């Protein structure tokens, strides 16, 4: 599913216009613990989080994640958005909860990262 379709499904808005909104997303990882994301996510996966600090950008960049969805209407500080802009990582914002976001994406065909089954 392409990111722009994900945005429509989640009624999400972009926090900047930089980045590739046509990227195809097959799996996602949802967490507010970046240690879990680092351990379990895979390159190309969508990051869903309510955490808004600058570590989000660094984590997404390290794992080569194509985009980040912020849930519960939480908006990161401008310095975090600016770093994502520079690195070309699209940030999108939805008012939906993390649970609702994950459910909608799962229903639409987005699956958990295969390696996220390691601990579950």
Image (cartoon, grey):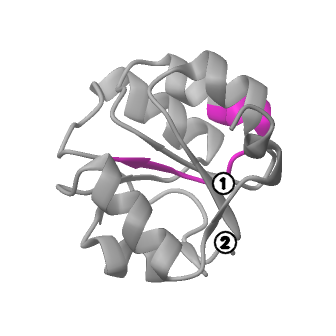
User: Which residue carries the number 2 mark?
Assistant: 23
Contact, CB < 8 Å: mark 1 with mark 2?
yes
Residue 83: x and y in percent read 51, 29
**Where is residue 38 shown, x and y percent of the image?**
72, 25
Residue furthest toward the front? 120
Q: Is residue 62 magenta?
A: yes
Assess disc 2: are there few (<14), some (14-19) or many (≥20) residues with their C-alpha within 10 Å of its C-alpha: some
Reading the image, the residue beneath label 1 is 66
Give 37 or 11, whichever is nearer the viewer: 37
**Around disc 1, counting alpha carbons within 10 Å, would you say few (fewer than 14), some (14 to 19), or many (20 or more)?**
many
Quick check: is 88 in the magenta stretch? no
- Residue drawn at (50%, 56%), measured in percent from left and top? 18
Question: Mark 1 falls on what kind of element?
Answer: loop
Say if 11 sits above or below 70 in the image.
below
Q: CA distance from mark 1 to mark 2?
A: 7 Å
Which residue shows up at 24% across the image and 50% down it? 97
The answer to whether any part of residue 104 appears in the image is yes
Q: What is the x, y in percent for residue 27?
A: 68, 62
Residue lying at 61% horizontally and 81% vertically, measured from the top left:
1
- Residue 85's tag is none
Q: Give left or right: position of 83 versus 17.
A: right
Residue at 35 percent across and 26 percent down: it is 52
Q: Position of residue 104 (x, y in %)?
A: 38, 72
Quarter holding the C terminus is top right
In the picture, residue 64 is in which quadrant?
top right
Does residue 61 sit above or below 107 in this rendering?
above
Q: Locate residue 87: give its quadrant.
A: top right
Mark 1 or 2, nearer chain start: 2
Q: Is residue 114 left or right of residue 28?
A: right
Q: Which residues are magenta?
A: 60-70
């Amino acid at each position: 599913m392409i990111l722009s379709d994900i945005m429509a499904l989640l009624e999400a808005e972009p926090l900047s216009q930089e980045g590739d909104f046509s990227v195809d997303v097959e799996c996602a990882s949802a967490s507010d613990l970046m240690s879990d994301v680092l351990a379990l996510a895979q390159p190309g996966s969508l990051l869903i989080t309510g955490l808004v600090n600058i570590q989000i950008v660094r984590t997404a960049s390290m794992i080569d994640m194509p985009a980040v969805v912020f849930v519960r209407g939480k908006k990161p500080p401008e310095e975090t958005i600016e770093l994502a802009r520079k690195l070309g990582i699209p940030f999108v914002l939805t008012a939906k909860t993390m649970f609702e976001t994950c459910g909608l994406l799962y229903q639409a065909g987005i699956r958990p990262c295969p390696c996220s089954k390691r601990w579950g």
